[in-house]
Image (cartoon, rainbow, N blue to C red):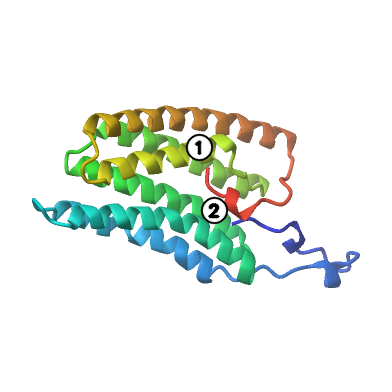
Amino acid sequence: MAEDPGSRRNPAGAPGGAAGARVEAHWFNIANTVTFLRVLLVPVILWLLLAETDGGTERWWAFGIFVFAAATDSVDGWVARRYHGVTRWGQLADPIADKLLIVGALASLAFVGELPWWAVTVIVARELSVTLLRVVLVRRRDLVMPASPWGKIKTVSQVIAVAAFLLPGMPEVAARRLLDLAVVLTIWSGIEYAFRAGRLARNGDRPTAVDPEERSG
């Protein structure tokens, strides 16, 4: 969730301080609750995969729940813009929730032996590195990095790959190729993000308004 530049408090007595300042919404709100929901659905997907039986509907439920959880990424941004505004906490929590959903679903599939652990390891390493960079930028420079187009493409490719593995009847070779593509895009987007973060830190620039839908990276 993006922070409106107008939400930063002006120093006492600064021109326009009382009239121009906007109080940021509390972190516990509907949009952030939807963000939490994405994380809470991960163990449900794992349970359904473990409980899968021949001819059962567990696989379809796992697929549907994952697609629903991934779709909430757009819902929480819309709710934040429409009802109570965006928060800096949401800016950080939203991409972390996205990562936990993807990594959790991938790890669940690897746990039941349907995809290789090396792919999970590569994706986890990238996501941890990017998350660490985000935290460092916020704590040391008070900067929040918006997502790049490559980050969005990476996320979409990961969602499609996971959905392909969960979808009943999907040919294994097709799902594997989609996973390979997602891994390549994951690595590239991580490299691109590191370069952008380095430039931002060196220049000391502060991003202006960040679109709430550009939170994931």
- Disc number at residue 69? none
Horizontal placement of 215 versus 120: left or right?
right
Residue 183 x %, y %: 39, 30
- 153 over 86 or under it: above or below: above
Between 126 and 41, the residue placed more toward the observer is: 41
Residue 18 x %, y %: 84, 72
The local secondary structure at tag 1 comes to helix
Between 85 and 63, the residue placed more toward the observer is: 63
Residue 189 x %, y %: 51, 32
The local secondary structure at tag 2 comes to helix
Which amino acid lies under the numbered mark 2 shown in the image of this protein? Leu
Q: Quadrant of residue 41?
A: bottom left
Horizontal placement of 149 versus 187: left or right?
right
Q: Quadrant of residue 68?
A: bottom left
Would you name the residue on which mark 1 appears?
153
User: Counting residues from the N terminus, which is met first, the one under dot 2 or under dot 1?
Assistant: 2
The residue carrying pointer 2 sits among few (fewer than 14), some (14 to 19) or many (20 or more) residues within 10 Å by Cα, namely: many
Between 10 and 191, the residue placed more toward the observer is: 191
Determine the residue positioned at 20% across, 38% down: 114
For this orientation, the residue located farthest to the left is 54
The residue carrying pointer 1 sits among few (fewer than 14), some (14 to 19) or many (20 or more) residues within 10 Å by Cα, namely: some
Horizontal placement of 51 versus 46: left or right?
left
Determine the residue positioned at 55% across, 47% down: 135
Q: Quadrant of residue 124?
A: top left
- 213 over 76 or under it: above or below: above
Determine the residue positioned at 57% across, 62% down: 78
Whether label 2 touches label 1, CB < 8 Å:
no
How many numbered marks are there?
2
Would you name the residue on which mark 2 appears?
92
Residue 199 x %, y %: 67, 31
Q: Closer to us: mark 2 or mark 1?
A: 1
Which amino acid lies under the numbered mark 1 shown in the image of this protein? Ile
